[in-house]
Structures are given as C-alpha cells and as structure tokens.
Amino acid sequence: MTDATASAGEKEAHRDFIRDIVAEDIASGKHKIVVTRFPPEPNGYLHIGHAKSICLNFGIAKEFGGRCHLRFDDTNPAKEEQEFIDSIQNDVRWLGFEWDALHHASDYFEQLYAWAEHLISNGKAYVDDQSADEMRANRGTLTEPGKESPFRNRSVEENLDLFRRMRAGEFAPGTRILRAKIDMASGNINLRDPALYRIIDAPHPRTGTTWKIYPSYDFAHGQSDAIEGITHSICTLEFEDHRPLYEWFLDNLPVPARPRQYEFARLNLTYTVLSKRTLTKLVQEKHVNGWDDPRMPTIAGIRRRGVPAAALRDFVSRIGVAKANSTVDFGMLEFSIREYLNQHAQRRMAVLDPLKVVIENWPEGKFEDLEAVNHPNDESAGKRTIRFGREIYVERDDFMEEPPKKFFRLSPGKEVRLRYAYFITCKDVVKDASGKVIELRCTYDPATKGGNAPDGRKVQATLHWVNAHDAVTADIRVYDHLFSRPDPGADGDVMADLNPNSMTVLSGAKVEPDLMKGDAGQAFQFERQGYFCRDRESTPDRPVFNRTVGLRDTFAKEVGKPAAKK
Ligand code: ATP
Ligand code: MG
C-alpha cells in the first residue's frame, strides 16, 4: 500500500479557521494548553454529524498536544438512558479517540445550583409562575419585543424561597421555572429572560431522585466549560445566537475560567437525516432494525455496515470545517469508503446470483488447490488457497444465451478465464421446463492453469466463481439510501420520504468458505461486486453479509464488466 494515498484526506486537510484560531492562541501565549470537549446529550446514538464534531474536538487536542474531555450533557433525565451513555463511549473509542477526562454535567449540579442562587441574590434571576403557553406568547417574535412577566420583579427573598422549594420538590412540573433577568426587549430572543431551571419529575441515571429541578442546556453548558477549564468550546452554528448568553453567564458569575465559544457548520448529507428526534422515531416505529441498522447514519450503523473507522475519519477530514452551512453529497462518503477499502480490504470471491457450471472434462470427485492473492497491490496481505472442482458457480448475468455484440462474457461457444483457475468454454445450456437456464456445461483447458494460454490466445473476460462443493450459502443484504430523495422532509413529512427499497436481500448467494472465519464486521472486496462484511447477526447456520458499498465503475472496467445490479 502506498503511503501517499493511504490517508490522503487525513493528510491534506488539517487546516481550518478553528485550527487557525487555536494555533494563534497558543502562539500568542493566550493559552498554554488547548482544552476542548465533546458534549453529547445521551438521548440517542451518535451519528456521522457527531463524528465530525468528535474528529474536530479530539483531533485539535491531539494535534496541539492538549486535552479533550468527553462530557455527557445529562441535564434532561426524561430522555436520557444508560444504553446511550455506553454506546457513545464505545463509538468515540471505535472512531479512534480516547478522552483525557470523562465528565458529566450532572457532576456540577450542586455548583450550578449555587450559581443560580448567586444570580437570584444579585437580582439577576427570578422564579416565574407563568404557564409554558403564557411564556411562549410573551416571548415576542423576531420583529416584536417580548412582554415582561408579572412575576419579574419579585423580591430576592421571595425568589430564593421559591427556588429552594422548587428544589425540595414542593411544586409540580411546569408550574414554575427559574429565569435569568436580562432583557425582554432584546433583539436576540435568547436574551429574553431565558430559562435556567425547570422542574422535572424523572429519575436521573446518575443522581437518581436527588434532584427535582434541572438546569437548562444554556445554563449548564458554558458553566461546565468554565469549571473544566475548556479553552475553545466548539459547537455548531445554530448556537451562534446563544453566544451572547454564554458570555452573559460568564460575566455575571464567579466562574474560575473564561472559555470561548466558536461555531462551525454542522454536517448535512444528501439522502440522510441527522436529527436525533427523527432517528429515534425510525427506531421506535421500527422502520429500521435498531440504532445499528446498517442503513442508519449512526456510527454504530456505519460500523455494522463494514465501514472502517479510518474511512470515516478520512471522510470527515476531506469535507473540512467551514463557517457556512452546506450539504455534502452522499457520494463523497462512498468515495472515502471505496478509496480506503480498495487499499485495505482483502479480496474474496462470492457469487451473488449463482448459475451452476459443470466442467465436463474434469473428473468427478477430484479437487485441486489453487492459490489466490488476497490483495493485488499489497503482498503483505498474503495468499489463500481456494479449491477448484467439477461443479462451480458463476454469476447468472455473466452468461447470455444470445449475446449482443459487445458482450464478452460467457455464451455458447465462448471461452473465458476463471480467476486464478483455467479457461473454460461453454458447450451446452441446460434449461428447466419453463425455459430458464439452470446449468451450463463447459470444458476447461488444462494448459491454461493460472489463467494464461501457452499458445498466447486471449479471452476477453475474467469471471469470478466459487466451487460448489465448498461454497457457503448466504443471505446478502444490499442497501440503498434510507430516504428516496436527496432532501428528505423538504415537503414537510420526512417519514413520507422513506425509501421502501432501502434493503434488498439476495438469498442463496454462494461465498468462499474462508469468509466465515475471523471477526464479523471486517470488510472484504467481493471481486467485481463491491465491499461486503459478515453481519454481526450472522451464524454458521444462517450466514448473512452486508454490502458496505458497490465498486466504482472505473475499477470494474479493469477486471471485466461487473454483474450490474441495482
Ligand atoms: P439534540 O441537541 O437535538 O439532541 P444534537 O445532535 O445537537 O441533538 P448533541 O448530543 O447535543 O446532539 O450533540 C453533541 C455535539 O455534537 C454538539 O456539540 C453538537 O454541536 C455536535 N453535532 C450534532 N450534530 C452535528 C452535525 N450534524 N454536524 C456536526 N456536529 C454536530
Ligand atoms: Mg444539542
């Protein structure tokens, strides 16, 4: 494998506006060490958008010799679960990163509570008894200012008393909230007395039933950054309008450090939805088979589909980090996957739609071991032994009884090469009662062992095959986009855009027995077909393979036209 192409993406990128800022802050001495964090809310599995954020936060820490924390933003116990906490750690590690510290926003609940009282004591926060509807109605719009709450001017004493009783669980959820007292007329809606604490009656995975009130994202986030000494708090663009609030808290609280928030464009992908709410719905309503369904854009789904972590990192690095939102073509992801797998995946043979071939001049019961290379450009991948025999399978569409002019593969009277084996010539065609071709009768030329004729005669196609005696019968799951349009949900209902044909199962495929060895999830190139891996649910009794991605056209041309399948 050549180093130049091994991780072209990972090498060439690595310069963007955030890295420039970090480099400058280090050079100017503003910071001695860079500290970043990745702050997922454990209310779902991580997706490929999170992968971008992970590579950015962990990547910067690594490149600049700093630290990156994994911090669970576990401030809403109503939606958070241990399964998600576990999967997130697993996925970050799988992507190739290790956190320098593991934190939870819930570690800071006591401190955050004290800071809320601090704001109240300084006349900068108040308990509001308005209903959620009233608050919404009084918030105003982008063009109209909001209306001040009738509870806005409560005394410090009354606010402290009510807030303490909120904490003690004296009030029902939804009856009161704690709000910052900033400016109901602000042009920035985030500054119109934002919520600091809500009453939530749900056990928390870590703090149990200790707390009856929970801090808002905005109140918890920046303060957690300050507590941890985060220098660069990197988030997606939709938080740009929250930055003034982020800074208002830092200005008005005795925090130990002053982090800065920077925003970058989130990843959007064609044919893909990256909203956790929609992904949760897909799982709950069983449109997919769980969070790690290979059609899901989750890291777990992408992994199960056979994509190596390095290919995903390569993709993230190729798309770069920008300040303006855009949508990346799904083909870019496939490009990175193919590019990586073409270099790293070992080759095997598998026949997806088998047609039996009987080699008439090959003795019954005789088998011959042949050598096959595992990777054409990488000797270190070694060789394996495959067996040839009298009965083999080839791809059904590598045969045509009445071929058009440009069809170079098998047809009556035509000679082709079997990869790593011999030249064979089609002598006869066997059909069933309905006229369907069920078997080809061929002869082989013993002088062509290894794939070359001593007399120099040429064949125009090389076919992949498997030996009928040894082949394993498997189901192959071929995936298409989960959504049938590049911009799912553009007409309003995202579920209406689900692709009814996002998975096709080819049953009765015949694969090299070697593919049943080793770990599930390892990707192989099935020659002339694409990249596949054994599914984690595959068993010896019921082998199942996932198609990771198809082959690119140019490569297919080199080895003979692929059995085009869609
Ligand atoms: P929600 O807040 O609706 O649950 P989320 O996708 O923002 O969804 P978080 O767990 O809050 O989920 O995200 C963790 C981090 O990942 C945040 O810093 C967020 O900005 C970042 N992130 C989320 N989605 C993307 C995306 N599509 N591209 C890049 N970064 C993302
Ligand atoms: Mg979020």
Image (tube, helix red, strand yellow):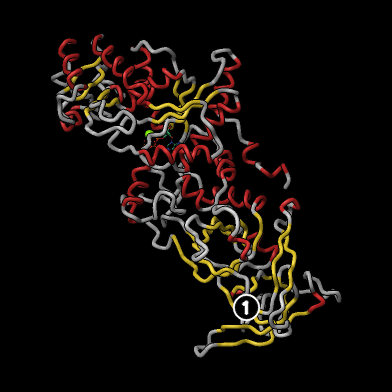
Of residues 31 and 292, the one nearer the viewer is: 292
Residue at x-position 65% and y-position 73%: 467
Kind of residue at badge 1: Phe
Residue at x-position 26% and y-position 26%: 210
Q: Is residue 552 above or below residue 273?
A: below
Q: Position of residue 118 (x, y in %)?
A: 28, 11
In the picture, measured across the screen, residue 193 lies left or right of residue 225, that is left
Q: Quadrant of residue 502?
A: bottom left
Q: Is residue 321 above or below residue 304?
A: above
In the picture, measured across the screen, residue 280 lies left or right of residue 124, that is right
Label 1 within 8 A of ligand 1 by Cβ: no
Q: Position of residue 165 (x, y in %)?
A: 17, 20
Q: Residue furthest right?
A: 455
Residue at x-position 52% and y-position 71%: 508
In the image, ligand 2 is in what quadrant? top left
Q: Position of residue 432 (x, y in %)?
A: 53, 88
Q: Position of residue 565 (x, y in %)?
A: 54, 67
For residue 462, say whether it is visible. Answer: no
Of residues 3 and 269, the one nearer the viewer is: 3
Residue at x-position 50% and y-position 66%: 541
Q: Is residue 247 above or below residue 211?
A: above
Q: Quadrant of residue 131?
A: top left
Q: Say which residue label 1 marks.
A: 399
Q: Is residue 446 above or below residue 249?
A: below
Of residues 153 and 141, the one nearer the viewer is: 153
